[in-house]
Image: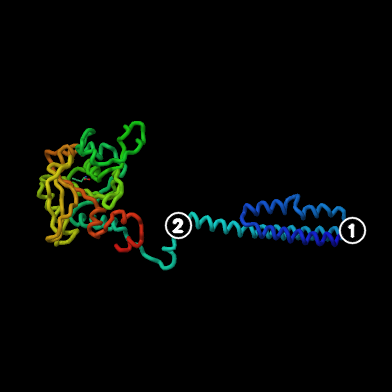
Amino acid sequence: MTSDLHQQIADSLESALRDVASAGDTRALQVVVSAVQGKKGRLAELKALLGQVGDIEQRKELGRLIGDAQSRLAASITIREEQLKDREHGERVASEGMDLSEFIGEHQRGHAHIVTQAMTRLEDVFVGLGFEVAEGPEVELDFYNFEALNMPKSHPARSEFDTMFLEPGSPAQQPGSVLLRTHTSPVQIRLMQRQQPPIYAVMPGRVFRRDTPDATHMPVFHQIEGLVVDKGITFAHLAGTIEAFTKAFFGSDFTSRLRPSFFPFTEPSAEFDIRRAEGDWIELGGCGMVHPNVLRAGGIDPEEYTGFAFGFGIDRMAKERHQVADIREMYTNDLRFLRQFP
Ligand code: PHE
């Protein structure tokens, strides 16, 4: 009987080890484990039979053999479990993960995005002309984005800005009074409320409009706003500033021109274009003398001070400058595109 038991212990260990090794995943391993290690497992059953072995020495010997078999089985389960967990973790990372291989290996120094580069250079040029750089919030109130810019509730010009509205954050706010700013002009008002003239400032930032992306439009884009408020500021100062900026930014072979236009927040208003000697005129942005109502909304006396403002899109300008065919290319984060503009 005992030699028979010897054989059975060896056989059941071997078959249990085989089952553990062939478990394909942690779930299957769980099933195998409860079958081979549980009370109804083969080794546990053999152990229960030991009571029938009369010889105490033989009983001890068989008990030791079963104990050894159980520890070997436990060790193999632990190892198999580690293997399967590792593999499943690897598979999960591979299926959920991003391909970061671009960054492995040789260290590569990145560079600023084409729009960030344009923004930084614009700031540099205006700082060189004596302007400060200011910023305002992207989530704005109707008051700053429209009302204080001489566009009261029913003003038709409001509909030209396809506005994205947000849920008001507090019950005190009217529905429709919180929005993503549609231009950088609200920062003019915030700046005037913060500081009395003289003001010479540029305000770059992200703006938002409900536009379907196409080759020349993105719902999120960038503008830079300029504001000058001081005693005796005239339209000539505006034209002179646009011209000085054009030459400093685009090169001395560029000139600018102003065309009559309309904006509710400036009067008179103009659009400005630039061109390289004898080249085609390229539309850049809007400008004009700050409307007296706007100065008043900013807490500035229009009898004492006058000012001018301008604003233009940075993405479109960068697109023109680098001859990018489709503005959406600038936001797909394709390194083959981005690396062209070091
Ligand atoms: N805010 C205007 C726009 O987004 C541009 C502008 C700025 C016009 C300042 C005049 C003065 O179209």
Tag 1: amino acid: Asp
Name the spot of residue 172 as percent of width and height, x first: 34, 31
Left or right for 34, reference 196: right
Name the spot of residue 133 as percent of width and height, x first: 24, 51
Q: For marks 2 and 1, give the CA distance.
A: 65 Å
Observer-nearest of 195 and 101: 101
What element does badge 2 sit on?
A: loop
Name the spot of residue 294 as percent of width and height, x first: 18, 39
If you read the primary sequence from the N terminus, does the residue marked by circle 2 or circle 1 appear first? 1
Q: Residues within 10 Å of mark 1 (few under 14, many from 20)?
A: few
Say above or below: 32 vs 305. below
What element does badge 1 sit on?
A: loop
Observer-nearest of 229 and 137: 137
Determine the image quadrant of residue 276.
bottom left
Determine the image quadrant of residue 19.
bottom right
Q: Which residue is mark 1?
A: 55
